[in-house]
Amino acid sequence: MFMRAMQLFSEEGRELPAHPIFFGGIAFGILMLLLYLVLRLDKD
């Protein structure tokens, strides 16, 4: 049981479901959207 948990939580067991650049692009897009909304609210 302990060895199974160690294998599951080791570096080999943790893999992203998509490429890291994909996650970076999504994070960048979300932050740009939030920045746009904040700057747009500031003009009103």
Image (tube, grey):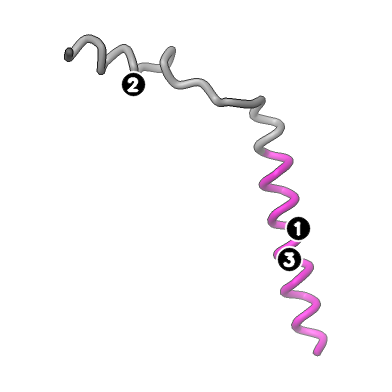
**Amino acid of disc 2:** Phe
Decide whether residue 2 is among the magenta residues: no
Mark 3 residue element: helix
Q: Residues within 10 Å of mark 2 (few under 14, many from 20)?
A: few
**Amino acid of disc 3:** Leu
Q: Which mark is residue 32?
A: 1
**What separation in Å lies between label 3 and label 1 (alpha carbons)?**
5 Å
Q: Which residue is mark 2?
A: 9
The residue positioned 51% from the left and 21% from the top of the image is: 15
Find residue 31 and report its horizontal and vertical position in percent. Answer: 69, 56
Total residue callouts: 3
Mark 1 residue element: helix
**Segment tinted magenta in the rendering:** 24-44
Residue at the left extreme of this rendering: 1
Q: Which mark is residue 35?
A: 3
Task: Tell me if label 3 and label 1 are in contact, CB under 8 Å.
Answer: yes
Decide whether residue 28 is among the magenta residues: yes
Quadrant assignment, res 24: top right
**Relative height, residue 27 to residue 44 (above, below):** above
Task: Please identify, in this view, whether the residue under mark 3 or under mark 2 is nearer the observer.
Answer: 2
